[in-house]
Amino acid sequence: MLDNQLTLDVSPYSTLYDIVVPKTYFLRQLTELCDFSFIYDELEKNYQPDFGRRAYSPIMMFKYLLLKDVYKLSDVDVVERSYSDMAFKYFLGLAPEDPVIEPSSLTKFRKLRIKDERLLDLLITKSVQIALELGLVKSKILIVDATHTKAHYNHKKPQEVLRERSKALRKTIYQYSEDIKTEFPSKPQEDTLVAELRYTQELISVLEKHDELTETPAVSQKFNYLKEAVEDDLEHLESSVKEDARIGHKSADSSFYGYKEHIAMTDERIITACVVTSGEKSDGPVLEELYQKSKGNGVTSEAIVGDKAYSGKDNIQFTKKERVHLVAKLHPAVSKGFRRKEDEFSYNKDAGLFVCPEGHMAIRKAKTGRTTGKYNSQETHYFDIHHCQTCPSKVGCYKEGAKTKTYSITLKSDEHLFQKRFQETPYFKEKVKHRYKIEAKNAELKNRHGLDVARASGLFNMKLQAATTIFVVNMKRIMT
């Protein structure tokens, strides 16, 4: 049976909150601004009615999840802090004297109840609705861009990551007790996941016998966070490393292994839509989805502002159809010719080079031909064949024994000539100046709210992290 806990319990001690939780405090403002009942409606279907013991309110459990994400705490530590932190209790809808949940209940909620990928859109929609109701969105500009997040396992073997984690834990422990190293298990001789996992679990078992260390504040949070991460990642480890996260490129000389968050934002810096993909996906093809999601959230636009990645032929045609100005500077390499969708490579705007579906970037490019009459020049991109020879997707892409692998593109002049004329207008030049705002928002998401590194493995967990992060960032913006 579900407990639809929507209001604060009546308690003779509730007046304490007026003293210890200031009205300007973020969690108090968030409670007063946002009615979280929409979470109950969304998650109710993941519970079985009249089965087992009385379930905790999905609203309260989701709030625990928000606190965990905002303050970067493990399940154990967010519950422990909720016991004594009055701001946490106020936000959770508990009376000052109320008990808190068991950490295992939060773990079960994360793994079994949060199943719906719509949560990302749902949280953004809610925050945008609040902004619209308060009259905070007045502009007709939509700014689009993508930012990247490094994978939880940053393109390393799983055993390498576990080895680094256990090493970091030992270094922290040695600051308090060097003698304990005699109790630690021998480091594994085999470079395998099974061996490293066995060692990590034995290391944790030893530390669990030393309460004087694991209860030390400086150690406990790191220890609990490590335990939780190891337990969570065991079930996602293999699939995440092989499938979800991919190589993406920030420039010709730098790459990352992880995911991309494609976001749309109003001129008032309210994020109106987000699409999470693996790291190798290009920015341009997501524009239509970002626009439609923003429009569905009640945001009307007369102009979409983006960088060169969004000036492709398809986007020019789409914005024309929607009667929206596309304020994105033209690049001659945005058109991919007449290839089938599955044969297209992605264009990386920062490097000025194409990237194959497996995430490998071209090593150089050259222009061929001359534009005369109806004929257009081509730009040929050359790839490192050493990657192609061992690529799992080489069938149909690389011809065995070939000395080169190239990818050529042709500028489609009709659509782009229209865009070229448009970008010379005063309107374009004024609107394009607003693009810097989304770069600042990306920096805020990553540097202040932890979106630079995924906190768990897998694309679904990345979407959940993006959902809670963007919701909190939007609400903070609304409060400001």
Image (spheres, helix red, strand yellow):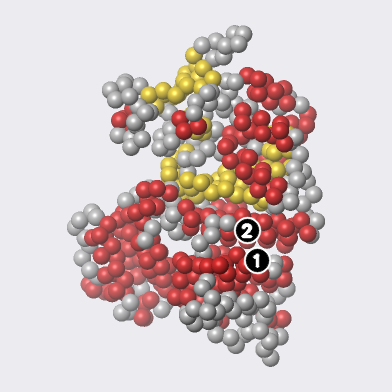
**Res. 480 in view:** no
Dot 2 surroundings within 10 Å: few (below 14), some, or many (20 or more)?
some
**Res. 151 in view:** yes
Of residue 469 and residue 203, the one placed in the foreground of this image is 469
Q: Is residue 54 left or right of residue 327?
A: left
Please report the residue visible at 62 percent of the width from the left and 8 percent of the height from the top: 373
State which quadrant residue 430 falls in. Answer: top right
Find residue 312 and name its label: none
> CB under 8 Å between callouts 2 and 1?
yes
Of residue 6 and residue 384, the one placed in the foreground of this image is 6
State which quadrant residue 58 falls in. Answer: bottom right
Please report the residue visible at 60 percent of the width from the left and 11 percent of the height from the top: 374
Q: Amino acid at mark 2?
A: Leu
User: Which residue is under mark 1?
Assistant: 38
Please report the residue visible at 65 percent of the width from the left and 23 percent of the height from the top: 416
Dot 1 surroundings within 10 Å: few (below 14), some, or many (20 or more)?
few
Quarter of the figure that contains the N terminus:
bottom right
